[in-house]
Image: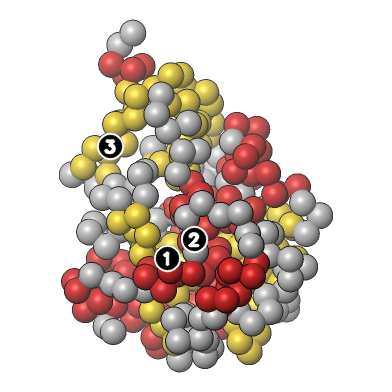
Amino acid sequence: MSDANLWLDEVYQGVVRTGFRLKRRVFKGKSPFQTVEVVETAGHGKLLLIDGMTMVSERDEFVYHEMIAHVPLFLHPRPRRVLVIGGGDGGTVREVLRHKTVESCVLVEIDGLVVATSKKYIPKTASALSSRRAQVRIEDGVKFVRETSERFDVVIVDSTEPFGPAKELFGPTFYKDVRRVLTERGIVVSQAGSPFYELGTIKNLMKILKAVFPVADAYTFTNLTYPGGLWAFAYASKGVHPVRHFNSARVKSAQMPLQWYNAEIHAGAFALPEFLRKAVGR
Ligand code: SAM
């Protein structure tokens, strides 16, 4: 077997390479937006890739999806309506719907190929997309937020990096629209990238959030799959502070079967390393 069949190399920013030992290449398809692939690896389960970038690995996707969903949902006093933008693999929706107060989770994913591929090849991640509380809309999240008259308690931006269709999801106009669709104690969290490789993106995003929301901050997690391990989410709200207003008893009483998120991890995730604290402007 040639090396290309033995290893999948994800090259990131042309400076770092992550190799995953392959068992087999499962799927490759092209949509009008991007190339979508699924491979089966020897050590990380199946991977979903978009344009050669690893989005999800079955081995550690629980980390990312628990951290993007449970931080805002255990903070909002009573989350009932949630909007997820991007997130076509379904992992974020699965975690959101663990919260019994959530009556409806609208997923707005621009690429139907991502949803179809995830349902077929990573069903554990995509399991909640067919829940009666989930509503999947295949359209541009930027346009949806600009035009919708619906209101949401929590908005989760689970997007790719700021290029292609995701570019405007990192801009001021989008976040002014997010502020409009959030209810009065609304919270938004967004995939913000690597503090090591994309500190500029995080800085810009924080500047935009601080200009639009009274509360803006960042939190981190570490995982196996993304380059450098350490990864960040941006947090903003109309008044709910991510640590001061966090009631750890809610997590304990929810008795949710989780693998990463817990009350200590919630508080600790907002303790930032000094270079990131400065970049976030805290
Ligand atoms: N966890 C991954 C990460 O951290 O990079 C993201 C997962 S999810 C697969 C990212 C999704 O965002 C992709 O399916 C992509 O199609 C979607 N996306 C990008 N731009 C979008 C837009 N403007 N509206 C809706 N979905 C968008």
Q: Residue at x 36, y 16 (%)?
A: 5
Q: Residue at x 37, y 43 (%)?
A: 225
Residue 54 to residue 74: above or below: above
Q: CA distance from mark 3 to mark 2?
A: 26 Å
Residue 143 to residue 41: above or below: below
Residue 115 to residue 219: above or below: above
Q: Residue at x 54, y 80 (%)?
A: 247
Q: Amino acid at mark 1?
A: Ile
Residue 108 placement (x, y as % from top left):
64, 59
Find the residue positioned furthest to the top: 1
What residue is disc 2 on?
Answer: 261
Disc number at residue 18? 3
Disc number at residue 265? 1
The crowding category of the residue bearing disc 3, from other C-alpha atoms within 10 Å (few below 14, some 14 to 19, many at least 20), is: some
**Marks 3 and 1, the one that precedes in the sequence:** 3
Q: Nearer the viewer, residue 101 or 21?
A: 101
SS for callout 1: helix
